[in-house]
Image (cartoon, rainbow, N blue to C red):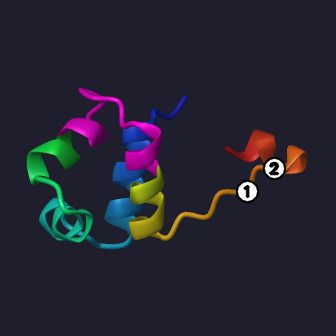
Amino acid sequence: MKTIGGFLKEVRMYLKLTQKQLSAKMGMSTRQISRYENNHTIPTLNILIKFFYYLGIKINASKNNANKI
């Protein structure tokens, strides 16, 4: 089972973004990005939405797609 941090890291790396680049876009430290990606800290819903926005992740909450998450 994937963790949210592992998922965020996977998407960031797929987009060829460094933690430094992402942290600059999101307005937070690279240390905080690392803490989220390594599951040392669980992001709040607002932070998670920010990650999704800057990583281009679309949220589809339909019942048919619930098992794809």
Q: Is mark 2 on a helix, strand or loop?
A: helix
Name the spot of residue 64 as percent of width and height, x first.
89, 48
Disc 2 marks a residue whose amino acid type is Asn
Q: Do callouts 2 and 1 mark residues in contact (Cβ within 8 Å)?
A: yes
Quadrant in the picture for the C terminus: top right
Quadrant in the picture for the N terminus: top right
- In the image, what residue occupies the spot 19% across and 62% down? 27
> Of 41 and 18, which appears nearest the observer?
41
Q: Which contiguous range is marked in magenta?
A: 35-48
Q: Which of marks 2 and 1 is in front?
A: 1
Sequence-wise, the earlier of marks 2 and 1 is 1
Disc 1 marks a residue whose amino acid type is Asn
Question: Residue 18 appears in which quarter of the rendering?
Answer: bottom left
Name the spot of residue 31 as percent of width and height, x first.
10, 45
Q: In this view, does 5 lie to the left or right of 2?
A: left
Does the magenta-highlighted stretch encompass residue 20?
no
Q: Is residue 19 left or right of residue 68?
A: left
Q: Which residue lies furthest to the front in this view?
A: 46
- In the image, what residue occupies the spot 36% across and 37% down? 43
Name the spot of residue 67 as percent of width and height, x first.
78, 40
Name the spot of residue 13 as percent of width and height, x first.
32, 63
Kindly identify which numbered label has been placed on residue 25: none
Does the magenta-highlighted stretch encompass residue 44?
yes
- Crowd tier of the residue under label 2, counting other residues whose Cα lies within 10 Å: few below 14, some 14–19, many 20 or above: few
Q: How many labels does the image show?
A: 2
Q: Say which residue label 1 marks.
A: 60
